[in-house]
């Protein structure tokens, strides 16, 4: 690939914002993802130079390892010396250069082919010494390959430069290790907009573009890249005028963001004076400050599983209680909605034991897991009830698919209160109890469930995944992940209608609630509380203030005449399209 050619890639806009900086590749898949591409005659010299540079870098790396090897390990250093020699071997170095030239192919592919021939040749030799050389060839070529692709295994926590991460994929746990003062933003080949990776990026307030397919192959370490998380664009090696354009777009975005953030504490009432509670979702206790500073009216979703994911074993009751109490006290008098452990699925902790499930998203996760682990569930429920004595707490059960799960969970809650009372502990039992509506069966029986709880919280991330059969983290189907799909809108309407009938509250804490463009539809459908990544709060409040509830209700009735998500989106853009541009760029 020729140097410094501007390349524009389109992916999923996962976290808004714009950043410009040097790429830093994080490779979790090693160097096995090698593809072949053809080169024009004019590109061959550059490609050979690229290969030579990678070999030179590999030689330097090996030399410095040899120098740093203590006397006692000289034998090991001798092996490395043979690797240095191999780097220049005609059979490897010479042949790879020849292949690039003759077959007009990229250096990675040429190296891969030469290595596989060499390996075959050495492995079939009868002499053990030569057979072992096959392993040396692999070590050496891996090193060259890493330098060619610019990939290396990186511990995100240890990155000490101001960079933009480029990865094939990042797990939620890795993403939560990102050091804000170092990492400007990130891009990945995989991922979907409601993957937990995307959610964490929004919470951290760093621009992110996901689902780029082959970004980690195209980008090399230290390439200058531009990440526009507002529209999902990634630009590699931007030309000067592109840079100027994006610097300008970045300042406009930041200016507008700080203007809107300053209005975060204003209340969110529509023009016809209907108050909407706009709250924050948090993963870790520290994020409570983000909610407070962005003007959140409480925590609508505390994803408590992240404390479990960060720990090496199940946290104790006191460890949980300490964190919950902090959050509750900081947020008081505003409510904190503590969701019980939503573990497994894409959020598996290593110590829960490998379940070996073919479909973890449909497996023993969330409430299902807790009901099979009374010890784990009780510990958490006791910690929540104890924290409730320090402010306003609501409890929320995830992944409810039937009435029995609610009844059982409530029984556990009552038992937890009973045991605390017996022990004479300080706690509070009369707290609001709610359930996540994120499994289609819960929508269908919303009328039955409403009898048993004080509120519903619609989790569109999973609800859309399960109702439309679209893996929320799968980039190949992310274009089908449509909150305006008529089936999704009908489900929301069914839930709000059932809740209204039984006089209980409905909030929404899925990502749909944090995207300003959907607010007119959600208000019109009867959602009275919205919870989102903290940084979205000011923009959503701002949007609420620009709306008239009567008009939203009329609009949401009309949107049901649209038979597809595209028609619905066009209709929405026609009436409320101003929202997106105004929120991001003023
Ligand atoms: C949801 O499913 O919409 C939700 C809010 O829960 P989570 O994203 O943690 O699965
Ligand atoms: Mg969910």
Image (tube, rainbow, N blue to C red):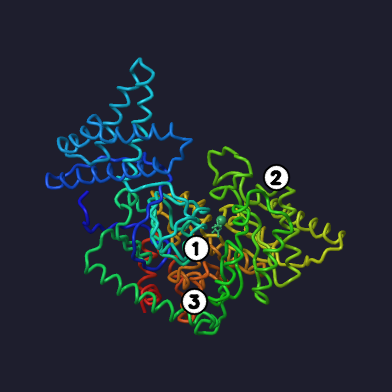
Secondary structure under badge 3?
helix
From the top left corner, tell me how far across and down residue 460 is, in percent: 52, 59
Q: Residue at x 23, y 41 (%)?
A: 106
Secondary structure under badge 1?
helix
Res. 233 visible in picture? yes
Q: Residues within 10 Å of mark 2 (few under 14, many from 20)?
A: few
Q: Is residue 24 above or below residue 526?
A: above
Q: Residues within 10 Å of mark 3 (few under 14, many from 20)?
A: many
From the top left corner, tell me how far across and down residue 180 is, in percent: 47, 64
Q: Is residue 232 left or right of residue 321?
A: left
Secondary structure under badge 2?
helix
Indicate which disc, 3 or 2, sits on the residue closer to the N terminus.
Answer: 2
Q: Residue at x 28, y 58 (%)?
A: 236
Q: Residue at x 43, y 54 (%)?
A: 192
Q: Is residue 343 above or below residue 333?
A: above
Q: Nearer the viewer, residue 235 or 194?
A: 235
- Quick check: is the Cβ at mark 2 less than 8 Å away from ligand 2? no
Q: Nearer the viewer, residue 147 or 424?
A: 147
Read off the residue under disc 1.
Answer: 511
* Pointer 3 with pointer 2, Cβ within 8 A: no
Read off the residue under disc 2.
Answer: 372
- Quick check: is the Cβ at mark 1 less than 8 Å away from ligand 1? yes
Mark number for residue 538? 3
Indicate which disc, 1 or 3, sits on the residue closer to the N terminus.
Answer: 1
Disc 3 and disc 2: Cα gap in Å?
Answer: 40 Å
């Amino acid at each position: 690939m020729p140097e410094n050619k501007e390349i524009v890639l389109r992916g999923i806009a996962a976290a808004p914002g714009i950043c410009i900086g040097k790429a830093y590749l994080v490779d979790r898949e090693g160097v096995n993802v090698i593809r072949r591409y053809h080169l024009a005659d004019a590109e061959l010299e550059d490609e050979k130079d690229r290969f030579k540079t990678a070999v030179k870098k590999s030689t330097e790396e090996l030399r410095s390892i040899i120098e740093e090897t203590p006397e006692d390990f000289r034998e090991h250093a001798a092996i490395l010396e043979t690797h240095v020699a191999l780097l220049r071997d005609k059979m490897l170095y010479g042949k790879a250069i020849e292949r690039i030239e003759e077959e007009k192919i990229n250096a990675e592919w040429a190296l891969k082919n030469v290595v596989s021939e060499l390996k075959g040749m050495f492995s079939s030799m009868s002499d053990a010494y030569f057979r072992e050389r096959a392993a040396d060839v692999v070590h050496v070529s891996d090193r060259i390959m890493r330098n060619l692709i610019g990939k290396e295994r990186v511990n995100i926590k240890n990155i000490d430069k101001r960079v933009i991460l480029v990865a094939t994929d990042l797990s939620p746990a890795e993403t939560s290790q990102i050091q804000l003062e170092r990492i400007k933003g990130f891009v990945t080949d995989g991922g979907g907009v409601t993957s937990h990776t995307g959610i964490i990026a929004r919470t951290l307030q760093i621009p992110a573009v996901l689902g780029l397919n082959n970004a980690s192959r195209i980008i090399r370490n230290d390439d200058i890249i531009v990440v526009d998380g507002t529209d999902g664009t990634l630009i590699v090696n931007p030309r000067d005028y592109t840079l100027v354009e994006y610097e300008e777009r970045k300042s406009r975005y930041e200016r507008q963001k700080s203007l809107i953030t300053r209005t975060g504490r204003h209340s969110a009432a529509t023009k016809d004076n209907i108050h909407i509670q706009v709250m924050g979702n948090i993963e870790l206790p520290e994020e409570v400050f983000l909610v407070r500073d962005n003007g959140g009216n409480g925590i609508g979703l505390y994803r408590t599983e992240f404390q479990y994911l960060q720990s090496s074993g199940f946290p104790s009751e006191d460890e949980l209680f300490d964190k919950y109490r902090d959050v509750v006290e900081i947020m008081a008098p505003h409510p904190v909605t503590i969701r019980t452990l939503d573990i497994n699925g894409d959020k598996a902790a290593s110590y829960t034991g490998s379940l070996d499930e073919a479909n973890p998203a449909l497996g023993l996760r969330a409430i299902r897991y807790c009901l099979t682990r009374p010890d784990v569930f009780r510990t958490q429920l006791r910690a929540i009830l104890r924290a409730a004595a320090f402010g306003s707490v609501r409890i929320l059960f995830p992944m409810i698919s039937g009435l029995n799960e609610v009844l059982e969970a409530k029984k556990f809650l009552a038992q937890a209160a009973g045991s605390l009372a017996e022990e004479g502990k300080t706690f509070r039992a009369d707290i609001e109890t709610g359930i996540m509506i994120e499994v289609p069966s819960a929508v269908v029986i919303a009328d039955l469930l409403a009898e048993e709880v004080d509120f519903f919280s619609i989790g569109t991330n999973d609800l859309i995944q399960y109702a439309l059969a679209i893996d929320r983290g799968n980039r190949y189907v992310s274009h089908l992940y449509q909150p305006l799909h008529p089936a999704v809108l009908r489900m929301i309407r069914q839930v709000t209608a059932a809740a209204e009938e039984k006089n209980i509250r409905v909030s929404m804490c899925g990502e749909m609630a944090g995207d300003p463009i959907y607010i007119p539809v959600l208000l019109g459908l009867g959602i009275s509380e919205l919870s989102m990544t903290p940084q979205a709060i000011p923009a959503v409040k701002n949007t609420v203030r620009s709306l008239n509830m009567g008009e939203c209700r009329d609009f949401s009735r009309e949107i049901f005449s649209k038979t597809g998500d595209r028609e619905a989106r066009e209709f929405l853009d026609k009436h409320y399209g101003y929202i997106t541009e105004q929120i991001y760029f003023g």
